[in-house]
Image (cartoon, grey):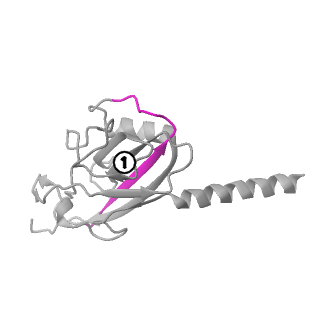
């Protein structure tokens, strides 16, 4: 009996892992582990980029997903708590792309660590080692997160982890030269 239970648990774990592997995130301008183009650099705080949000695409959304969210987080920011660059919640479950120019109806952007909703591009301190930028799409078990545009990244992060059915991540890097 013990062997049957362990075998069943192993099968369930493998099935969940293979389903999670189907949930993937991509972008026409970002490559995993590679530097982002300056197009996605912030324009301010000494940075001179275009502050253009990348288009994001995903597939393999887990069954039972009722809404989606997208976050961009820099865990290497010298703050002690990282830096939230973009938080978009309440995306319809059927969404398969995010383009900041045309957000789907019902989507809500919340406050980033730049102090306002919307995309805020990469802007690591000049001369720092490359920072990692974690672009994540979250599949959620709720139709809508109970937040407004002033919600902090910490609150959004808490709610996402509370309601996550799965997530897909693409991590790109960015480094600003020491002389800028």
Left or right of 107 on screen, residue 3: right
Q: Is residue 1 above or below residue 172?
A: above
- The residue nearer to you, when weighing 25 against 46, is 25
Q: Which residue is mark 1?
A: 70
- Residue 13's image quarter? bottom right
Q: Residue at x 27, y 69 (%)?
A: 35
Q: Residue at x 59, y 57 (%)?
A: 19
**Residue 41, image x, y percentages:** 18, 59
Q: Residue at x 25, y 42 (%)?
A: 112
Left or right of 178 on screen, residue 57: right
Q: Is residue 42 above or below residue 173?
A: above
**Residue 82, image x, y percentages:** 32, 49
Disc 1 secondary structure class: strand
Residue 50 within the magenta-colored segment of the rendering: no
**Residue 165, image x, y percentages:** 53, 45
- Residue 178's image quarter? bottom left
Residues shaded magenta: 129-147
- Residue 26's image quarter? bottom left
Q: Quadrant of the C terminus?
A: bottom left
């Amino acid at each position: 009996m013990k062997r049957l239970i362990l075998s069943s648990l192993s099968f369930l774990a493998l099935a969940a892992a293979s389903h999670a592997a189907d949930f993937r995130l991509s972008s026409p301008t970002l490559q995993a582990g590679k530097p982002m183009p300056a197009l996605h650099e912030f324009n301010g705080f000494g940075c001179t980029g275009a502050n253009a949000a990348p288009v994001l695409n995903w597939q393999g959304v887990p069954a039972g997903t009722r809404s989606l969210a997208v976050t961009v987080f820099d865990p290497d920011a010298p703050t002690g708590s990282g830096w939230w660059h973009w938080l978009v919640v309440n995306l319809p479950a059927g969404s398969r792309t995010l383009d900041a120019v045309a957000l789907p109806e019902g989507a809500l952007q919340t406050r980033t660590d730049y102090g306002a909703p919307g995309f805020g591009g990469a802007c690591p301190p000049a001369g720092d080692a490359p920072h990692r930028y974690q672009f994540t799409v979250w599949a959620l078990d709720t139709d809508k997160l109970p937040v407004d545009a002033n919600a902090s990244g910490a609150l959004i992060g808490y709610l996402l982890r509370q309601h996550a059915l799965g997530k897909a991540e693409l991590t790109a890097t960015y480094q600003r030269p020491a002389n800028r």
